[in-house]
């Protein structure tokens, strides 16, 4: 049993009549947090997620908002409490979309996005573009709120925003005042400016200032990637909860880990077999959601690219390798020889198993990194789902049998190298 962590001062918050425990939100991420990914996180958390939110839904394009045109609106009953997030720059269109969504789907809340930094969104005045035009943001909140109050008064309005457009124009305190004045009932603050994109660190001092001044729950967002960080942010910045994005892309167990800690339970040790089990589960959710085989395979690889970083050698590391040798898979034995080389048992080093050379080059060497890379490569080079799951089975019965799984190896935020690479400084000047 692993030790768990101190329980923070707050472990839940209220949204109208709902008590949200644990006080976590899976941050909406377009192209990632679709229904299958959300269901996966929910199952892995033992059904203790806090809140789930849809990927953002555009409203500007439709003269008449059409529910059928937006696959992001699909959610499963077990995802509740569940919110739909909308974005746009026209108050009437935002309000009409909110009304239709509220009446037809009865989500547990409707959220306005004032955070998206992408040029095609923010550049047109939607998403974080609204932070340069607070009167417009106010008008949108006013229209959406009064429409909801008239049609579905039981559905609360929430807002997700950044701290400002750039470091010269931080206006989170004004945004908070507007939100409260217009009847917003929860504010999630991503502690970066629009200009930062996803680079650098989130500024939690501003999040903390907003939380201290707020009468509504303020949820802090940015760089939360472990139980310890979640607890520290809640305790030190006074937020009602935390919203976790990229941390969950790397570690979909994070919500369950937090719930365990908040419930005072010992931390659950994830086995390598459990980690591998995530793939068939996710695949099933993708297929149930109507995905094609290749579409689902792409998402398995997206997840695998991150998740495989957690596989590592246990105390019995070299034994794991010998076990794999016995299992006989060729590529596995290559990697094992790499691991064994560091135990002076590799006779074929000069024949150059790639893993061995990699390990040699590492000097002190991180054997576990080789192990993780091997599993990652094995899965990510599969050409179709049958091949993927065949390889997965081989790993399960051979190489991975004696491995450990350590989620703390998963996340390298701020880093945040992965998203920095993806987004770079593309927003500068736009
Ligand atoms: C790929 C990607 C897609 C995102 N899509 C959305 C979105 O649809 N709506 C939203 O409010 N935020 C979106 N975000 C922002 C995240 O919700 C979150 O605010 C941000 O990643 C910071 O949190 P983190 O450090 O925990 O990742 C997205 C972020 C990423 C990386």
Image: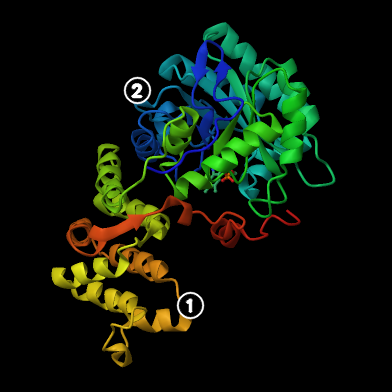
Image quadrant, ligand 1: top right
- Out of 149 and 282, give the one closest to the viewer: 282
Mark in front: 2 vs 1:
1
Residue 66 seen in this snapshot:
yes
Q: Residue at x 43, y 27 (%)?
A: 67
Query: Percent from the top left, x then y, of residue 37?
Result: 38, 41
At a point 44% along the width and 45% down the height, the residue shown is: 32
Measured from the top left, where is residue 248 in percent x and y? 47, 44
Q: Is residue 82 left or right of residue 136?
A: left
Residue sitting at x 41%, y 42%: 253
Q: Are marks 2 and 1 in contact (CB under 8 Å)?
A: no
Label 2 sits on residue: 77
x, y percentage for residue 287?
A: 25, 42
Location of residue 350 with respect to 180 vertically, above or below: below
Q: From mark 2 to mark 1, how far is it between C-alphas?
A: 50 Å
Q: Position of residue 358 (x, y in %)?
A: 41, 80
Q: Residue at x 47, y 79 (%)?
A: 362
**Which label was assigned to residue 364?**
1
Q: Is the C-beta of the residue carrying label 2 under 8 Å from the nearest atom of ligand 1?
A: no
Give the label on residue 314, or none.
none
Of label 2 and label 1, which has the lower sequence position?
2
Left-right relation of 266 to 377: right
- Helix, strand or loop status at disc 1: loop
Q: Residue at the right extreme?
A: 168
Compared to residue 44, the image places residue 83 above or below, namely above
Crowd tier of the residue under label 2, counting other residues whose Cα lies within 10 Å: few below 14, some 14–19, many 20 or above: few
């Amino acid at each position: 049993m692993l030790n768990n962590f101190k329980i923070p001062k707050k472990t839940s918050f209220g949204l109208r009549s709902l008590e949200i425990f644990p006080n976590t939100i899976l941050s909406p991420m377009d192209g990632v947090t679709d229904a299958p990914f959300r269901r996966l996180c929910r199952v892995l958390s033992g059904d203790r997620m806090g809140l789930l939110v849809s990927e953002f839904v555009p409203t500007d394009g439709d003269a008449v908002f059409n529910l059928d045109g937006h696959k992001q609106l699909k959610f499963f009953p077990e995802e509740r409490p569940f919110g739909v997030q909308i974005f746009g720059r026209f108050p009437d269109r935002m309000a009409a979309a909110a009304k239709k969504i509220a009446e037809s789907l009865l989500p547990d809340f409707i959220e306005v996005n004032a955070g998206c930094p992408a040029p095609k969104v923010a550049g047109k005045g939607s998403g974080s573009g609204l932070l340069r035009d607070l009167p417009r943001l106010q008008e949108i909140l006013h229209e959406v709120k009064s429409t909801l109050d008239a049609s579905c008064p039981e559905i609360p309005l929430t807002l997700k925003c950044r701290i400002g457009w750039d470091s010269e124009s931080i206006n989170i305190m004004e945004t908070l005042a507007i939100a409260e004045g217009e009847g917003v009932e929860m504010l999630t603050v991503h502690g970066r400016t629009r200009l930062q994109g996803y680079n650098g660190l989130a500024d939690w001092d501003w999040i903390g200032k907003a939380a201290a001044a707020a009468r509504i729950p303020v949820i802090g967002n940015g760089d939360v990637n472990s139980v310890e960080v979640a607890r520290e942010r809640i305790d030190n910045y006074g937020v009602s909860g935390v919203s976790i994005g990229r941390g969950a892309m790397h570690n979909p167990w994070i919500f369950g880990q937090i719930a365990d800690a908040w419930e005072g339970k010992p931390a659950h040790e994830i086995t390598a077999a459990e980690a591998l089990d995530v793939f068939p589960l996710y695949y099933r959710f993708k297929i149930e959601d109507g995905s094609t085989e290749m579409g689902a395979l792409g998402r398995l690889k997206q997840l695998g690219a991150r998740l495989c970083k957690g596989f590592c050698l246990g105390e019995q590391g070299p034994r794991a390798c010998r076990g794999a040798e016995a299992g006989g898979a060729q590529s596995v034995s290559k990697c094992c020889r790499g691991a064994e080389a560091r135990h002076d048992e590799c006779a074929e080093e000069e024949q150059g198993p790639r893993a061995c050379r990699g390990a040699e080059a590492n000097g002190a060497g991180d054997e576990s990194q080789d192990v993780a890379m091997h599993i990652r490569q094995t899965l990510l080079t599969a050409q179709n789902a049958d091949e993927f799951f065949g390889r997965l089975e081989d790993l399960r019965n051979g190489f991975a049998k004696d491995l450990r799984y350590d989620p703390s190896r998963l996340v390298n935020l701020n880093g945040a190298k992965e998203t920095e690479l993806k987004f770079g400084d593309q927003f500068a000047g736009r």
